[in-house]
Image: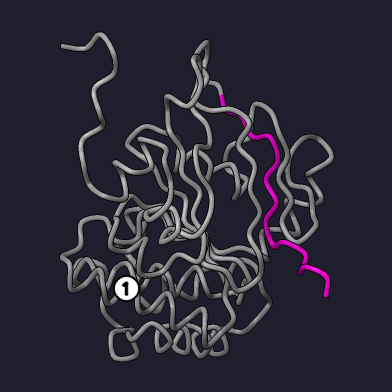
Amino acid sequence: MSEPTPLLQATGLAQRFGARTIYRDVSFSVAPGEVFVILGGSGCGKSTVLRQAVGLLPPTAGSIEIAGHTITGRAGEAGRAVARRLIGVMFQSGALFGSLSLLGNVSLPLEIFTDLPPEARDAVARVKLGQVGLADAAALYPAEISGGMAKRAAIARAMALDPPLLFLDEPSAGLDPITSAELDRLILDLRDDLGATFVVVTHELASIMAIADRCLMLDRNAYPDAGGVIAIGDPHDLAANSTHPMVRAFFHRTLMPATAGEP
């Protein structure tokens, strides 16, 4: 039986800002129905990889395909146009528009990208809010809701066009442990009930172990002059079997061992 075509294929990604190389040689693929987590320490380039994958930041080197459509380079213009309908993005802060109700926020992509009449847009938006447990909050504004509700509303907006691939940037950031666990459960339910595929950027260890089918770990010191990939695989397997000191320190919440010559 042949492997399914990846929804996301990244090959040889690199990113430089001026003379500084953040990472290089980052390659990975994401299969349909998978929850794929990008993790690592602060400053390793997790959110930068996400920005490249959604087409917001052209990589210095490498290529990205979404559902077989190249979105990088000059040849990627047509692919980027197609990809806009194939992906949904939840940004770290939620990025909800304060002047719009939750219903208005979720219906906005439908207003921009479809010809649906207003009543149909509102009906779809109400369905999406219901799917994230906010059916009774449609009339509320972002200033009137909790941080966890804002994250759910942002996921609903990302789902508005029924994209097969959803990107979540630090979905648990700033949430208490119970709300974080509820959000983890929501991600798994959406994967199981709707067949959605997720790429999640996070450093929250509990969430990683709860939701990730596979993870990609970046380290800003992977090479002498830049960061890169130090591990990829099932997080439970990496936690149990990896011998890489950074991987072990991350998954076991321990200090990195001192290197030779350190006091």
Measured from the top left, where is residue 122 in percent x and y? 49, 86
Residue at position x 34%, y 60% in the image: 171
Measured from the top left, where is residue 262 in percent x and y? 21, 12
In screen coordinates, is 116 left or right of 235?
Answer: right
Q: Is residue 32 shown in magenta?
A: no
Measured from the top left, where is residue 42 in percent x and y? 32, 36
In the rendered view, tell whether residue 142 sits above or below residue 230.
Answer: below
Residue at position x 49%, y 60% in the image: 234
Q: Amino acid at mark 1?
A: Leu
The N terminus lies in quadrant: bottom right
In the rendered view, tell whether residue 72 sits above or below residue 99.
Answer: above
Foreground of the two, 18 or 9? 9
Residue at position x 41%, y 61% in the image: 236
Q: Secondary structure at mark 1?
A: helix
In the rendered view, tell whether residue 191 sits above or below residue 257.
Answer: below
Q: Is residue 6 shown in magenta?
A: yes
Q: Which residues are magenta?
A: 1-15
How many numbered marks does the figure carry?
Answer: 1
| Residue 25 picture quarter | top right
Work out whether residue 11 can be spotted. Answer: yes
Work out whether residue 96 can be spotted. Answer: no
Measured from the top left, where is residue 103 in percent x and y? 39, 79
* Residue linked to disc 1: 183
